[in-house]
Amino acid sequence: MRSKLLILNFAIVVIIFSVFSCKKKETPSEDHSQHDPAPFVPLNINYPAAYVVNGNSNNISVIKLSDNTISETISLNGSTFPHHIYLNPAKTKLAVAITSKDLSGGHSGHGGSLPGQKIQIIDAVTGNIDKEIGVGKLPHNATYSQAGDELWIPQGDSVQGTVLVYKTSDWTLLNTINVGKLPSEVTFSNDGSKVYVANTKDGSVSIINPSTKAVIQTVTVGAMPVGAWPASNGKMYADNEGSQTVSEIDVITNSVTATINLGFKPGYVAYNSSNSELWVSDATNGKVVYYTLVATVWTNQGNIITGADAHAITFSSDGSKAYVTNQGANNVSVINVSNHTVTATVNVGTKPNGIILK
């Protein structure tokens, strides 16, 4: 009788253990599902918008231009320190440079290789990351050719800088072009006829024929140029951080035709066709200084207080509005170009740098 009771008790224990074991097996499954990444939900950015790259928040704020409100936030899949952003000619794809390094303090010694450096190609409407291109050196930006069939990417190296050219139809590497030391921004002239690479360590700008991929000429500018920015007046404007100047380069002659002494470290240069004004961001003093030609000399006409560490500048298609990212203030200033006043301030993520309008 005693043995039968022992057998019965043992059977009951086994059954209870089995029941609780089955229940326990469900718990990890439920917990695991809670930690799975949320499924991608397509956005619908089918309206005029500004895309603002937040370098320290590691995402993109989308500003609806009709009312200057944040309408969406685009995740960058865990990437760190995104920098500048460009839009293809069809206005369907964004190219964002992931530097894995904070460049908000300046561009001295900014090159080299770090984990996670790449270019992300993002659908401008849905916000989906369509493609990631891993690169070997720091990419300051990535910009599309005038036809949109190529993507040009600088590679920051202190010994031999290069520019990679990719075919956008299948993302094959077409060319590797040698330029100067520590190249930063690569840009196209306003008419698309030439490509410019600011060689930060060399104090020069490489000028490239986009068809042959050959360097036509290397022009000496000021110390530590970061970008040669296009203008509709047939010029390019190189912002020289080290010498605190802007060098004007003629697109036709490939020569420096003017040097503007600023007295502050430039963050960005943009030309406004409507007013024939040259705008330069003053990062140190949190403002934008604008210049006009007076008797063939670029002359300071005033400044607009925007926010700490003023950086990128872009204009609306009609030239009536300007948008300025303020890295230290974590916002974007909206400016009325005709009277040079700030009409709105939009809070975005931390350390906003690049901005593009669609």
Image (cartoon, rainbow, N blue to C red):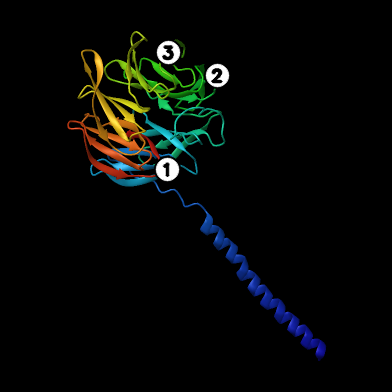
Question: Which of marks 3 and 1 precedes in the sequence?
Answer: 1
Q: Amino acid at mark 2?
A: Gln
Which quadrant of the view contains residue 160? top right
Residue highlighted by disc 3: 220
* Residue at the disc numbered 1: 59
Position of the C terminus by quadrant: top left
| Residue 151 in the image, given as x and y percentages of width and height | 44, 25
Q: Is label 1 in a helix, a strand or a loop?
A: strand
Separation of residues labelled 3 and 2 (CA atoms): 17 Å
The image quadrant that residue 147 belongs to is top left
Q: What amino acid is at disc 3?
A: Thr
Specify the quadrant of the image occupied by residue 351.
top left
At 67% from the left edge and 78% from the top edge, which residue is drawn?
Answer: 16
Q: Residues within 10 Å of mark 3 (few under 14, many from 20)?
A: some
Mark 3: which secondary structure? strand
Residue 75 in the figure: left or right of residue 334: right
The residue that disc 2 covers is 160
Residue 358 visible in the current orientation: no
Mark 1 or mark 3, which is nearer to you?
3
- Which one is nearer the viewer's eye here, 179 or 311? 311
16 relative to 325, above or below: below
Q: Earlier in the sequence, mark 1 or mark 2?
A: 1
Mark 1, Cα crowd under 10 Å, few <14 / some 14-19 / many 20+, is many
